[in-house]
Structure formats: structure tokens, C-alpha cells
Image (cartoon, rainbow, N blue to C red):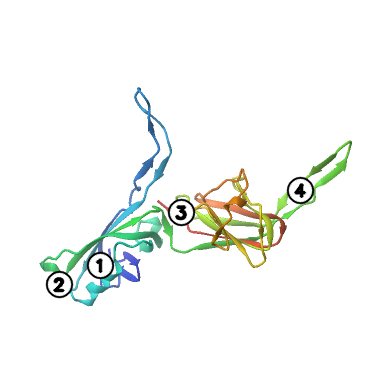
Amino acid sequence: MSDWQATYNGLTIGAGTNYGISSISGLGGIPEIRSGDQDRTRVHGQFAGIDLFAGRDIDLEVTIPSKHPSNSVWQAFSAAFVGGQATELPLVLQIPGVAGGAEIQVNARVRKLSLPLDMEYYTGTGRALVQFHATDPRLYESNLQTISATQATSAGGLTFNATFNLSFGGAISGGQATATNAGEFSTPWEATIAGPVVDPRIINNTTGQVLSFTGSVGATESLVVSSFDRTVLLNGTASRYRWLNTGSQWWDLPPGNTVFQYAASSGAGSLTVTYRSAWI
């Protein structure tokens, strides 16, 4: 277990530190299921709903080979794991056998800190238990991945006259970038569309799903689109969800490759997508 390591709120525990990890629970198996099943009326059984994951609890048992409650080693430990916080912080973990041994992170808050006041605590080797709760149960790759694309171009359409006009639009080409989710579970993404651009579109060329918008993004502006929060924000603050056209479809990135394409009615601009590979 000497190569296990965890970092939270500026404190690293595990290999090469003053703190040893004796056990971790909550990473193996799957988180609690939030079932959408509904009971059938007056008959046996249920109507099948959608199974979704709830949050994730992670318990970390730590050994601290240092005595006396006023010791700076203990003070640093308790200061890092303060409960009652409103903001989730990244818990960064590297555990053999979890996510293929990759460095991963879970955004979590401290829900419990137990420091037993026994003789070991006062004489040389204390034990502590820290419980974290993550509202998003995914185990994310700690490295943020980034892909980008410039605007796609449209081939010229075919137009001819009969007794009425017919027009066929040309195919969209270029403007593509591939996102690779190296994990085993779908992961959200965030896209930033930099102006100037009119009526931008984010296209999933792998599935055919499209997020299309009616609106103008200025030369010094950006449109930030989050698949996790389902938000559309001008300059990252002002909601422009009303720009989202009827028929648009949200998606997450499944394991493997997803090809993004960026297009628009006019203008230039660019698309940048950030994401992390994910496990569950």
C-alpha cells in the first residue's frame, strides 16, 4: 500500500508523506442507484424506469505515526479536512487497480472526520477516518483534455430553374476534432465558441446529434456550453439558453472516440472543447 496516494485541499497523504493510507472504500463497485421504476397498480411488478447513479461516498482510513494532539502533523491533517463546506474540492487519487492505475479525481466535500482519542493517538501512531461525499459519482482523469476546431465550410449547392426554384444545400466539410474518452463511462464536456460568429452549431458527427443556436457572438465574446449543467452562457455568465433551437439534442462522450464538428451561418470564430476521461 506504500504507493497509494491521495491529495485534498493542499494536503497529500500516502507514499512519501507523514500519513499512511491503510484502506479506501467507495471506489470499487458502483455507487447507489437512483431508480425510476414505478409500481404497477393492483398487479405484481413494476414499470421499468431509468436507472441513474446518485452520489458517491468515499471512506479513507489514515495512519499517522506522530504523537500528541498539538503536533503540527496532526494540525495540518485536521485543517485540510474541515466539514460543513459549500464547495466541492478535487480529491486526487492514484490507487493501483482503480481506473487502470491512472491519476483520477472526484469533486467532493468532507462529510465526516473521526480522530479517536486513544492511547495510540497520544503515544505514537494514531488512526483517522475521513468520509467524502461527491455529488457527481464519476471518477475523472485528473488531466483536462482539450480539442479545438475552426469553422467548417459548406460546398456549393445545386440550383436550377423549372416552373419553380429548387435549391440543394451543399455538404459541410472540415471544422472537425476528435475527443477520446479513454475511460469506461460516459463523460460530460464543455465547449467555448469564440466569436465573431452568427448562428453557430456544434455537431456530433459520430451520432448525428446537433446543438444549434440562433444568435450572434461578437468578436470579443464567447458562448460557453456545458453538457453537464445543460447551460448556454454568453461570456460564461449571462444565460442564452433561449438561443438553443428546437430539435437540438444534448449528449455526453461515451468511451472511445467522438468527432465534433463546428459550423455556423456566417462569421469565423472557433470551437474549443474540454473534457476528462471517466470511470464509474
Residue 24 higher or lower than 125, as above or below: above
Image location of residue 234, percent across then percent down: 58, 60
Q: Earlier in the sequence, mark 1 or mark 3?
A: 1
Circle 2 crowding by C-alpha within 10 Å: few under 14, some 14–19, many from 20 = few
Cβ atoms at labels 1 and 3 below 8 Å apart: no
Give the spatial CA distance, label 1 vs label 4.
62 Å
Cα–Cα span, label 3 and label 4: 36 Å
Residue 170 - label: 4
Q: Quadrant of residue 107?
A: bottom left
**Camera sees residue 14:** no
Residue 71 shown left or right of residue 132 in the figure: left
- Residue 60: image x %, image y %? 27, 60
> What's under tag 2, amino acid-wise?
Gly
Residue on which disc 2 sits = 124
Where 99 sits versus 74, above or below? above
Residue at point 30%, 69% (across, down): 80
Q: For marks 1 and 2, give the CA distance.
A: 13 Å
Give the mark, 1 or 2, whose residue is nearer the N terminus: 1
State how far apart marks 1 and 3 are (Cα): 28 Å
Element carrying mark 4: loop
Amino acid, disc 3: Gly
Residue 102: x %, y % from top left: 41, 61
| Residue identified by numbered label 3 | 183
